[in-house]
Amino acid sequence: MCGIVGYVGEKQALEVVVGGLRRLEYRGYDSAGVAVVADGELDVRKKAGKLANLESLLGEDPLPGSTTGIGHTRWATHGGPTDANAHPHVSADGKVAVIHNGIIENFAELRAELTAAGVVLASETDTEVVAHLLASVLPATGHDLAESMRAVCRRLEGAFTLVAVQADVPDVVVGARRSSPLVVGRGDGENFLASDVTAFIAHTRHAIELGQDQVVELTRDSVTVTNFDGTPATVHAYEVTWDAAAAEKGGYDTFMSKEIAEQPKAVADTLLGRIGADGLLHLDEMRVTDTDLREVDKVVVIACGTAYHAGMVAKYALEHWTRIPCEVELASEFRYRDPVVDRRTLVVAISQSGETMDTLMALRYAREQGARVLAICNTQGSTIPRESDAVLYTRAGPEVAVASTKAFLTQIVACYLVALYVAQVRGNKFGDEIGSVVRDLANMPRKIDLVLDTAEDVKALAAQLQDSRSVLFIGRHVGFPVALEGALKLKELAYMHAEGFAAGELKHGPIALLEEGVPVIVVVPSPRGRSVLHEKIVSNIQEVRARGARTIVIAEEGDESVVPYADHIVRVPQCPTLLQPLLAVVPLQVFACAMATAKGHDVDQPRNLAKSVTVE
Ligand code: F6R
């Protein structure tokens, strides 16, 4: 939540910063603002609404040229999305400008202290207190912004990323990080700070991860990182492996449609190099020993939203292949219910961004109880993998659209790899059985490609259904989380009532929702797998149709038994039941995207949402 960019170098800072904000806008779009340092002064422009509003303002009221600047795109927490609450916030003396991501929990107390000292605050934000505190500390540190930042950060509670510049010292940008993302980009004669590498990938691929409670000072030629107590910090430098084009729309109308189309590659990349010539899995990078895995007696998956649905899918496979009991829990609920976890529990934290605060807090709690935590994450250097005992990265590449698509598929694949690996280590599965699943997995990118061929048909269906008041989704077994995911996509993009149910549960209440013409999307398992599952869902299709529902059926090629009861059929290639979510969810993603487009909504930036949710 909130996108942050800082730049110092030889280029015009405004261009770099606004370019970076464009790539970070997915993190929040309630307001945007920039500040540059020029001629011993700070110049700020900020505006409520999307970045385009700020760009118009910059056209009407240009900033002076400068090679040092900061910029922010906001997802509002404290204070509504107004011009006054937009960042940057400037100290009363006009000497310091600050941008911020996160929440300063003791801000009320700090605000009261500043007010008592006669400071008049211009906004309702928690951020503004930092600007005033920095200004008050600067004289005592000889105007050393990094030293002042450390002093102020020691007083702050909560999770925050802060970036500041000061009027009197050009060519210096200072950042601070606690439990919120901040990455350094190292260039030649220029350096960058950003919430995410996408902001500077067009300029450099050399990145540095910052750790917890660290302050970084950037000049054109130096990057100095210290801990909040002033001691030198150890940091981890890495190279970003994808290029700028990966974070561009590349000819697609929206990032979401591009990311849906990238799914075959994302799945193939996530499998790459993890299966040896011997057909066995090699997950050495995971940093968890086989002895540890043999001791595990329970798996608990924690995640939010789409990642939670991926975890629900994974449970079926994990329990089937390893016979270890597995619970899947919303991260936001986990730590508040006194869960039973101990050192024999493997907690799997799934997160695309690696920054979701609910998941981070849940994993910290699990580790405090002695559990081992394995992160499944798409973002290198992010907080969740850093704080976990082990990590398996998905290789979806940057996911820019707020609605998660390719991350979901790769999270399922990564969970499956972990489950198979655990089965391999513990001897629950023999090499040939693992080899057979692995071969099926390797065929999935080609099959996903075939599902993508149905996109035009699904879009036409969405156009027909765009005036529906409500859409229901049902499924059984792994089709149940797929139904939940289909409903989530439709809610967040088309802003319409959509609900997913376990098909068997329908008759226990939700069937009362059915009336003439209500679309019910049914995820049908393979008739070749456990036929009883298939038979039951065919009965469910008949039940909903008998009550006037319009049945839209996602069924395997060759499954003729659904034909008499389906108003519309979307075909997916044949595959084993456990792998079917990788195919069945794709038409649901396309459906939601098309429905939002038909309704004229912003597909990539749905209202009220932000890509990475860094507040609890
Ligand atoms: C839905 C969506 C969210 C995220 C959730 C977790 O399309 O994107 O539900 O899945 O906020 O985010 P990560 O995976 O970054 O932890």
Image (cartoon, rainbow, N blue to C red):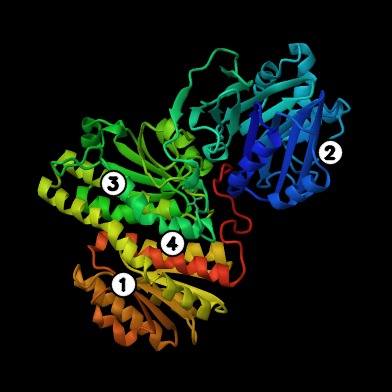
Q: Which residue is mark 2?
A: 122
**Mark nearer the viewer, 3 or 2:** 3
Q: Residue furthest right?
A: 118
Mark 4, Cα crowd under 10 Å, few <14 / some 14-19 / many 20+, is many
Amino acid type at mark 4 = Glu
Q: Residue at x 56, y 32 (%)?
A: 182
Residue 125 in which image quadrant:
top right
Mark 3, secondary structure of its residue: helix
Q: Which of 79 and 252 lies nearest the eye of the viewer?
A: 252
Amino acid type at mark 3 = Leu
Q: Residue at x 79, y 24 (%)?
A: 167
Q: Which of 167 and 569 lies nearest the eye of the viewer?
A: 167
Q: Which residue is mark 4?
A: 485
For marks 4 and 3, give the CA distance. Answer: 23 Å
Q: Where in the figure is residue 284, as x and y percent of width and height?
A: 26, 33
Q: Which of 471 and 371 lies nearest the eye of the viewer?
A: 471
Of the numbered discs 1 and 3, the one sitting upstream in the chain is 3
Q: Where in the figure is residue 185, as x and y percent of width and height?
A: 54, 29
For marks 3 and 2, give the CA distance. Answer: 52 Å
- Image check: 577 left or right of 209? left
Q: Which numbered disc covers residue 524?
A: 1
Mark 1, Cα crowd under 10 Å, few <14 / some 14-19 / many 20+, is many
For marks 4 and 2, give the CA distance. Answer: 42 Å
Amino acid type at mark 2 = Ala
